[in-house]
Image (cartoon, helix red, strand yellow):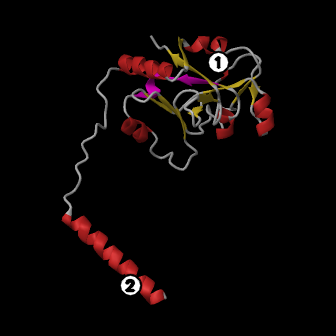
Amino acid sequence: MSAARDEILARVRGAVAAAAAAQPPVPIAYRRAGTRTPAERIELLAERLRDYRADVRHVSEREISAAVPPGRITVPPGLPAAWRPTDAVEDDGFSPRELDELDGVLTGCTVAIAETGTIVLAGGPAEGRRALTLVPDLHVCVVQPNQVVETVPEAFDALRGLERRPLTFVSGPSATSDIELKRVEGVHGPRNLMVLIVDRS
């Protein structure tokens, strides 16, 4: 039994190697870098996020805390103090049930991709643990201008070295469709996403 298995696998490996040798290498011609200006990248990101039904607002850094909707909002321990609403509750390991009882969460992000309207969370100090951004019904995310890239390859370049972290890619509020193609929101994460893009001008 073992000898027959080894022979079959050897033949498969030989066939795969022969096929690979006969094939010319596939050229990698996709764009690895964008051409838009920083302002154009931010404009495209906001446009794509709105297409996904996210609430996008341009704010100054000092306006972040005031832009967060009222309610019981939790924040990760490493969130900058200047961003926190006065009544924010710091996450100290809330259980999923406790997170579900909160009104929302305020976090930062690691990178945002303009072309796809995607925000990437990598569990950094201002982002907190993964459950923090998946359980509450509202996620308010702060995006800094220098975190916005144009293409997916640029985002993966920015994430280099963070591969072992629990990466979360967010493209709008959580939504899916049932068998009749009716949109259902809030199945896999927050039903509401608010993105605060910091205006440095």
Task: In this rendered view, identify the residue nearer to me: 168 or 22.
Answer: 22
Taking depth in this image into account, of 69 and 111 the one nearest to the observer is 69
Q: Main secondary structure of the magenta part?
A: strand
Placement of the C terminus among the 4 image quadrants = top left
Name the one closer to the observer, 95 or 100: 100
**Residue 42 in the image: above or below residue 101:** above
Q: Which residues are magenta?
A: 139-149
Of the image marks 2 and 1, the number of the one nearer the N terminus: 2
What amino acid type should be assigned to the residue bearing mark 2? Glu
Q: Name the residue at 36% across, 80% down.
A: 10
Q: Nearer the viewer, mark 2 or mark 1?
A: 2
Question: Which residue: 56% across, 15% down?
Answer: 61
Regarding residue 9, the answer to whether it shows in the image is yes
Residue at 57% from the left image edge and 23% from the top image edge: 142
Q: In the image, what residue occupies the spot 19% across and 58% down? A: 24
Q: Amino acid at mark 1?
A: Ala
Q: Is residue 76 above or below residue 51?
A: below
Asked whether 141 falls inside the magenta stretch, the response is: yes
Coordinates of residue 117 in the picture (x, y in percent) = 46, 27
The number of discs equals 2
Query: Which quadrant of the figure has residue 60?
Result: top right
Residue bearing the label numbered 1: 82
SS for dot 1: helix
Which residue has dot 2 on it?
7
Q: Would residue 135 be counted in the magenta stretch?
A: no
Q: Is residue 55 above or below residue 177?
A: above
